[in-house]
Amino acid sequence: MFLCGANDFITIFVAPECFSLCSYLLSGYTKKDVWSNKATMKYLLMGGASSSILVHAFSWLYGSSGGEIELQEIVNGLIKTQMYNSPGISIALILITVGIGFKLSPATSHQWTPDVYNTSSYIPGISMNPIIAIAQDTLF
């Protein structure tokens, strides 16, 4: 909900992190299950790595745009300083793609996804990925 109206880097970073923190807690809800603890730790470490990659990408954009955090001001700063074709911007965009990719768990970075979904109970599994839960209920 917060991400829809995001206009700056702080909101773009904090909104998914609030959801991630809740997901970490829900995935580790069953403390006595060893596999659940292992999956939660894997999920937490991958989430921390993706968050650090995302912050690093935002710092590249922040430095290249002249110290702006609002998206429109970043575009204006990149045009004004003619840095829009620089390698730093390409690196930042690649890092943003990788950071968000780890959060969304596409095919190349999904090591934690099967473990977390298999070891969490039904309700946390639904809240972490509603599309998978609806498809599972429909198919099976």
Image: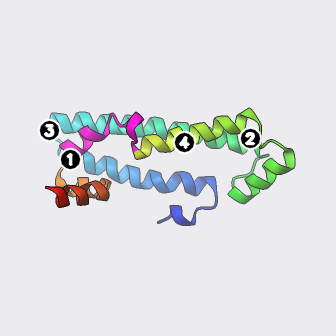
For the point 18% across and 35% down, the residue is: 35
Which residue corresponds to mark 2?
63
Residue 10: x and y in percent read 59, 54
For the point 54% across and 36% down, the residue is: 53
Name which of mark 1 and mark 4 comes first in the sequence: 4
For the point 30% across and 59% down, the residue is: 130
Residue 56: x and y in percent read 60, 37
Q: Mark 1 near mark 4, Cβ–Cβ under 8 Å?
A: no
Image-based side of 138 in relation to 95, left or right: left
Give the residue type that dot 2 points to: Gly
| As drawn, 137 above or below 28 | below
- Quadrant housing the C terminus: bottom left
Which residue corresponds to mark 3?
33
Which residue corresponds to mark 4?
97
Answer few, some or many: residues within 10 Å of disc 2's Cα (few below 14, many 20 plus, some between 14 and 19): some
Disc 2 and disc 4: Cα gap in Å?
A: 18 Å
Give the residue type that dot 4 points to: Thr
Name which of mark 2 and mark 4 comes first in the sequence: 2
| As drawn, 50 above or below 129 | above
Name which of mark 3 and mark 4 comes first in the sequence: 3
Residue 118: x and y in percent read 19, 43
Q: Main secondary structure of the magenta part?
A: helix
Is residue 107 highlighted in magenta? yes
Give the residue type that dot 3 points to: Asp
Name which of mark 3 and mark 2 comes first in the sequence: 3
Name which of mark 2 and mark 1 comes first in the sequence: 2
Which residue corresponds to mark 1?
120
Magenta span covers which residues?
105-118
